[in-house]
């Protein structure tokens, strides 16, 4: 008689990794492979959408990133294909229709914290580049132009800094910026932090923060209540020459109103790692194309605007944390274990 040995990996769930990028091969793929086997991974270098959802056929789990689209139609399609779990490689979940997922019984888990230091440090980096015109100086010197005319900046020291949202990333950003000895450190959050109060942060209304800050850094999640929190009306109340930093979500800023504020010189500088219509461009090489987004195209021409392509999270430490947490979320899903990483639909009252 021949004794048959079953392959334990055959019983493992198959996983479709959408928006797969080269850096996902450094930490995420090895971590998942160690648990389910390489043969159970489908690495897809395309965004999840109605057009690509069929690629998840045969998979019980999909692993998504920030610009993957999991709206009602896509979630229904995933459920029809037999998908049982959505693993998010992100903190935010505004790209997932939670109500539909709950109706179809899909388990959704996220990475609530990967490296808040990575994102906070990026915010400060963008700010420093803007106020000291480092990006312009860099380009000049590369062309052997050592003239420093028109590179005059200003001190962060003594300025009023407003932190809109004092969650993990907002608090770390505030602590870093507090090292510059600002004149005032303002904060707005529905849930004020005692740690920030001890740091010297003055909690004020959103309106006061926007009106009195020389520098505004956004650290709130994208929700209906925060969509276009920076818009035509709020920009009108801001100080002349205000500097705005956004490493959170693109939809927090009305891009059209932002451009107008820059043209009127109401806004003195903008540093963004996100853009409200970034899905069509970010994480892609569009260098041989004419951008169809006219506002983005014009924003890129402003000398006092720095836009990076959603890279604030991209550090070695963050990638490892994302991988480790994603694998643990998968194990918890398989075991039916409850976790604070589960994203549940909460019906609005």
Image (cartoon, rainbow, N blue to C red):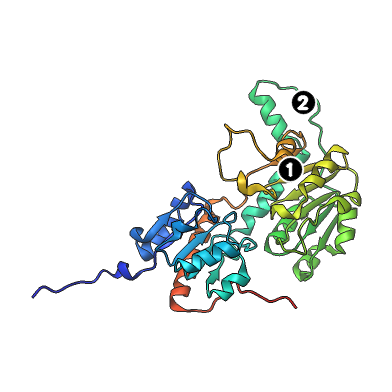
**Residue lying at the far top of the rendered structure:** 144
Q: Is residue 169 above or below residue 12?
A: above
Q: How far across and down, in percent of the image, does residue 230 sit?
A: 81, 53
Residue topped by disc 2: 148
Q: How far across and down, in percent of the image, does residue 267 sit?
A: 84, 43
**Residue lying at the far left of the rendered structure:** 1
Residue neighbourhood size for the residue with mark 1, other residues' Cα within 10 Å, grouped as few (<14), some (14–19), many (≥20): some
Q: Residue at x 77, y 43 (%)?
A: 270
Q: How far across and down, in percent of the image, does residue 229 sit?
A: 80, 57
Q: Quadrant of residue 128?
A: top right
On the rendered structure, is 128 left or right of 33? Answer: right
**CA gap, disc 2 to disc 1?**
17 Å
Q: Secondary structure at mark 2?
A: loop
Task: Tell me if I can see residue 331 in this picture.
Answer: yes
Q: Quadrant of the C terminus?
A: bottom right
Q: How far across and down, in percent of the image, does residue 317 sit?
A: 53, 55
Q: Residue at x 47, y 49 (%)?
A: 45
Residue topped by disc 1: 128
Q: Secondary structure at mark 1?
A: helix
Q: Residue at x 87, y 39 (%)?
A: 265
Q: Nearer the viewer, residue 311 or 139?
A: 311
Task: Tell me if I can see residue 328 in this picture.
Answer: no
Q: Nearer the viewer, residue 236 or 346?
A: 346
On the rendered structure, is 110 left or right of 135? Answer: left
On the rendered structure, is 34 left or right of 20? Answer: left
Q: Which mark is residue 68?
A: none
């Amino acid at each position: 008689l021949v004794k048959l040995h079953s392959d334990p990996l055959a019983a493992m769930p198959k996983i479709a990794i959408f928006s797969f990028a080269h850096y996902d091969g450094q930490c995420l793929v090895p971590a998942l492979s160690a648990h389910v086997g390489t043969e159970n991974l489908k690495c897809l270098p395309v965004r999840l959408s109605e057009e690509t959802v069929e690629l998840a056929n045969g998979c019980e789990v999909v692993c998504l990133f920030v610009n993957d689209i999991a709206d009602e139609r896509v979630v229904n399609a995933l459920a029809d294909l037999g998908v049982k779990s959505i693993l998010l490689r992100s903190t935010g979940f505004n790209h997932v229709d939670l109500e539909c997922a709950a109706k179809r019984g899909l388990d959704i888990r996220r990475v609530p914290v990967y490296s808040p230091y990575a994102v906070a440090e990026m915010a400060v980096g963008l700010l420093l580049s803007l106020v000291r015109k480092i990006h312009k100086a860099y380009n000049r010197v590369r062309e052997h132009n050592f003239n420093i005319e028109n590179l005059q900046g200003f001190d962060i020291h003594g300025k009023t800094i407003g932190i809109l949202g004092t969650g993990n990333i907002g608090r770390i950003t505030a602590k870093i910026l507090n090292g510059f000895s600002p004149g005032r450190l303002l904060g707005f959050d529905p849930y004020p932090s005692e740690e920030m109060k001890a740091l010297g942060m003055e909690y004020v209304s959103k309106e006061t923060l926007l009106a009195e800050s020389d520098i505004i850094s956004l650290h709130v999640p994208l929700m209906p209540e925060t969509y276009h929190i920076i818009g035509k009306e709020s920009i009108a109340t801001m100080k002349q020459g205000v500097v705005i930093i956004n490493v959170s979500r693109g939809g927090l800023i009305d891009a059209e109103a932002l451009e107008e504020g820059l043209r009127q010189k109401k806004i003195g500088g903008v540093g963004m790692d996100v853009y409200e219509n970034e899905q069509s461009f970010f994480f892609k090489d569009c260098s041989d194309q004419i951008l169809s987004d006219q506002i983005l195209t014009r924003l890129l021409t402003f000398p006092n605007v720095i836009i990076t392509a959603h890279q604030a999270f991209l550090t070695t430490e963050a990638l490892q944390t994302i991988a480790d947490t994603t694998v643990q979320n998968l194990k918890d899903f398989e075991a039916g274990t409850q976790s604070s990483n589960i994203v549940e639909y909460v019906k609005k009252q």
